[in-house]
Image (cartoon, helix red, strand yellow):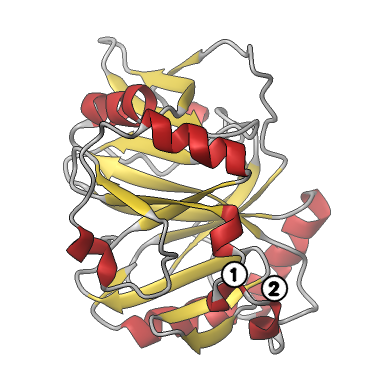
């Protein structure tokens, strides 16, 4: 994540999400299953975001699929020493750098080492990095790039009354979405989501926010697409930070869903943050 005050941003995630502060060499907040990194830059923008391929076979298949896709300039990635040597990156239609690497390479990274977590808050429930969201003025081109070029699968689309695409949720595994795209006037980072193991875990995280007097700005609610329960807070740069649970597990033959663009789609229980 870019930030005009990277240390302040990392300190927020350390405190609110029970993480540990480190610098290897990028300043980061890490805990088992989740990490965020911050470098100097413009608020609400990303330097890059990273997906890993879980098996060697999946990594090989992905590299074959993406062999003809123009890669991001090596200089875009070489500044981040924590990326493994086999990582490959691409620029999406909005200019975001999306990076892919094999899970086996990432497991050897010092940032991922369990020894890093020796001061993480063990009293909190687990919370695994699950997805991120991006706002975009080019949603059709973005959906085409991630689905048709990189091979993400569209789980659900959200259309307005004129049939225009307003949001799209794409998956990379059986979980409902690894990427959420929201039509908006500007291109920017929207949120990241950590997945708690169950409803009880989500309540413990909400109580933790209450103990810190950290305002929950949206939720507790239940998304329509994905059917997950959630709440969101805002970090010091204004990015949304989500805890969710119970996200839909999709079968390989699950048909794509179509939802109406309205508050109830984004929150079956009440009010929603509308991006446009």
Label at residue 108:
1
Quadrant location of the C terminus in the rendered image: top left
Does 14 sit left or right of 18 as displayed?
A: left
Q: Nearer the viewer, residue 133 or 117?
A: 117
Give the mark toward the camera: 2 or 1.
Answer: 1
Along the line of sight, which residue is nearer the eye, 4 or 33?
Answer: 33
Which mark, residue 80? none
| Local secondary structure at mark 2 | helix
Please name the residue shown 52% across and 13% down the image.
256
Residue 173 seen anywhere in this rendered image of the structure: yes
39 is higher (above) or lower (below) than 223: below
Cα–Cα gap, marks 2 and 1:
32 Å
In front here: 193 or 60? 60
Q: Residues within 10 Å of mark 1 (few under 14, many from 20)?
A: few
Residue 3 point in image, percent of width and height: 28, 74
Say which quarter of the image contains residue 151. Answer: top left
Q: Which residue position is annotated with label 2?
A: 208
Q: Position of residue 112 (x, y in %)?
A: 60, 72
Q: Is residue 139 above or below residue 24?
A: above
Q: Are marks 2 and 1 in contact (CB under 8 Å)?
A: no
User: Image point 67% across, 31% down: which residue?
Assistant: 248
Image coordinates of residue 246 in percent, x first then y, are: 72, 40
Residue 121 placement, left or right of 217:
right
Q: Where does the image place residue 118, in percent across and percent down from the top left?
A: 72, 87
In which quarter of the view is residue 26 placed?
Answer: bottom left
Mark sitting earlier along the chain (2/1): 1
């Amino acid at each position: 994540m870019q930030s005009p005050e990277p240390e302040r941003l990392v300190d927020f995630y350390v405190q609110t999400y029970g993480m540990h502060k480190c610098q290897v060499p990028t300043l980061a907040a890490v805990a088992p299953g989740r990490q965020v990194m911050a470098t100097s830059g413009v608020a609400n923008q990303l330097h890059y975001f990273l997906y890993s391929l879980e098996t060697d076979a999946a990594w090989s298949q992905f590299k074959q699929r993406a062999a003809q896709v123009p890669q991001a300039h090596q200089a875009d990635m070489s500044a981040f020493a924590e990326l493994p040597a086999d990582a490959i990156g691409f620029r999406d239609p909005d200019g975001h750098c999306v990076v892919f690497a094999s899970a086996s390479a990432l497991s050897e990274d010092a940032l991922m080492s369990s020894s890093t977590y020796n001061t993480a808050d063990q009293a909190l429930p687990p919370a695994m990095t699950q997805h991120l969201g991006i706002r975009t003025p080019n949603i059709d081109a973005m959906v085409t790039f991630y689905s048709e070029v990189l091979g993400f699968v569209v789980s659900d689309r959200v259309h307005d009354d004129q049939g225009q695409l307003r949001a799209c949720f794409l998956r990379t595994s059986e979980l409902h979405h690894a990427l959420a795209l929201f039509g908006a006037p500007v291109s920017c980072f929207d949120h990241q989501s950590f997945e708690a193991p169950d409803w009880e875990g989500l309540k413990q995280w909400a109580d933790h926010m209450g103990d810190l007097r950290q305002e929950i700005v949206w939720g507790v609610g239940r998304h329509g697409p994905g059917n997950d329960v959630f709440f969101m807070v805002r970090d010091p740069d204004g990015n949304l930070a989500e805890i969710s649970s119970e996200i839909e597990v999709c079968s390989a033959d699950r048909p794509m869903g179509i939802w109406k663009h309205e508050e109830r789609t984004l929150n079956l229980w009440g009010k929603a943050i509308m991006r446009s």
